[in-house]
Image (cartoon, rainbow, N blue to C red):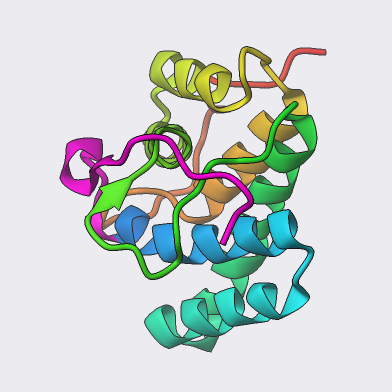
Amino acid sequence: MSDHPPAAALPLGDTRCDAFETQLLPIARLLVASLNLSDPTLWHRATREAVDIWGDAIGYPVAHALGRVVITVHECRASKLGFGLPEGRGQVTDDERHFLRMLHHMRRDNANEARSAVEDLTQGLMAPDVIRAGLSFAHRFACGLERRRRTAPPVLSVVT
């Protein structure tokens, strides 16, 4: 799906992602492929897949918010994101691992690990737009059975 082979694949289980985060991977792969190949039909396919997984009420917002994260990462990097094929199972590339790790730690408000993942994903940049999009996604789709509104601001924040 991309014009260059992705980096060596690692086992998906090594990411320690929860079921929700694992289900984001094929959707993110379609979104990245859509940008890398300038093919809007893949963007629509990603949205359909999200709706198939979570239904209309959750699927559309997931696809939209995840798309914002993918776009901001795509725009700040010097090279294309090295994501695998949408149909790939059980393996992740380095970029996919960094992407999932970023969302994983942002959803848990683990600032230090989230910062490290952002830096790895953006090739050394602490891109404020990526952090904003990631935190927006993380706040909307917070981790855990109980979704409480935050009473305090997240520890990880954008400094300009």
Q: Above or below — where is 137 with respect to 58?
A: above
Q: Percent from the top left, x then y, of residue 74?
A: 71, 41
Q: Is residue 80 above or below residue 77?
A: below
Q: Position of residue 3 (x, y in %)?
A: 63, 51
> Which residue is pictured at 72% across the width and 22% down the height?
127
Image quadrant assignment for residue 129: top right
Residue 123: % across, % down = 61, 19
Between 47 and 105, the one nearer to me in the picture: 47
Q: Is residue 73 left or right of residue 144?
A: right
Would residue 38 be found to the left or right of residue 43 on screen? right
Which residue is painted at 47% across and 23% down in the image? Answer: 117
Magenta span of residues: 1-19
Q: Identify which residue is drawn at 43% across, 13% down.
A: 112
Q: What is the total number of numbered labels drawn onto the structure image?
A: 0
List the single residue furthest toward the right.
Answer: 160
Q: Quadrant of the C terminus?
A: top right
Q: Main secondary structure of the magenta part?
A: loop
Residue for point 55% across, 85% down: 48
Q: Is residue 36 visible?
A: yes
The one nearer the camera, 25 or 55, is 25
Q: Is residue 5 magenta?
A: yes
